[in-house]
Image (cartoon, rainbow, N blue to C red):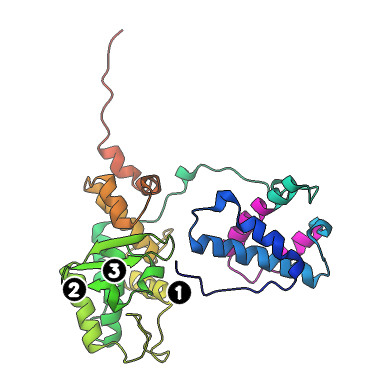
Amino acid sequence: MKKCTKTLRLKAEAYENLLDDYLNLKEFQGLSPLTLSSKRITIVSFFNYLTEQNVDCVEDCLQKHVAGYLTSLTRLAQSTISGRTFILRHFFNYLHALGKLTYSGNELFPVIFTNKRERILSFYSDEEVRLVIRAVDRQTGLGTRNLAIVLLAAELGIRSGDIVRLTLENIHWGRNTIEFIQHKTGVFNQLPLPERIKYALIDYLKNSRPHTSYNAIFLGMKNGGKPLTNTAVHQIVSKYFRKSGVDISFRKHGPHALRHSLASNLLRKNTPMHVIKDVLGHSNINTTRTYLNIDLDSLRTVALEVPYEEV
């Protein structure tokens, strides 16, 4: 199991046993290392804040301390704050159940229930995706690299976190596959290597990739040849969405939008759901079902008419 390299040290040993007990809960067994790491970072960050406020044990934590901690997070992205709030809600419910606190996580962070089907994911048609790919300037070294990145996201649905971690060992030229452990889920994924992506990779590797000691395939051109980050991949894809002339109003336009689009367009072509599941690298077909919600218009076109029956 690959250990997450991002760590945060606990400042006070007094919280160590409580942290370990929480992270070793039976309900957390089977979670990916990335998910557990996220939980640990959040709880350690909160405990370190309490230490800075001279709160030596969790029983002395007041609601004002929780509010102060959340205020200290304002420099972070809203999505990160939401994720930490979700983790803290569960953690405070745990402390309340143990009798360590008189208030629960649900009291601190009331849950607002929403219909997930109402949150339509951004997706683009096959033609719009083709326009994005065509927008890449293939006559430059930067363009050859970016073309390979856009194709991996658009035609194979690979997440940006996996694109930046791809190495030559993941490319099996002889059997025309890309094989890797997904960073987000820890699940192995094997995908075909279509000729267009294969030749885009070869072009980049032979003619444009900087010569460095890094194993990552995709390297920066202006950062000393260091591996790209998730943010860099998002900026690259977003750049070609804007250059393509495709209407991106009210739609996200990063690599994940291309992944959603792949799922949507496979569905339009009546691709079986288990095939879409394998393409996206999902371990559970219920996860894949969420992608079916993005193509309501397509589903309506194949809906069967309800026969009228006189009574």
Q: Secondary structure at mark 3?
A: helix
Q: Which residues are magenta?
A: 64-91
Residue type marked 1: Thr
Front tag of 1 and 2: 2
Are the residues tagged 1 and 2 within 8 Å (C-beta)? Answer: no
Q: Is residue 59 left or right of residue 292?
A: right
Residue type marked 2: Trp
Q: Is residue 109 in view from this perspective?
A: no
- Marks 1 and 2 sit apart, C-alpha to C-alpha, by 28 Å
Quick one: label 2, few (<14), some, or many (20+) residues within 10 Å?
A: few
Are the residues tagged 3 and 1 within 8 Å (C-beta)? Answer: no
Circle 1 sits on which residue?
231
Query: Residue 220: x percent and y percent?
Result: 38, 85
Q: Is residue 171 left or right of residue 234?
A: left
Circle 3 sits on which residue?
152
Circle 2 sits on which residue?
173
- The C terminus is located in which quarter? top left
Magenta segment, prevailing SS (helix, strand or loop): helix
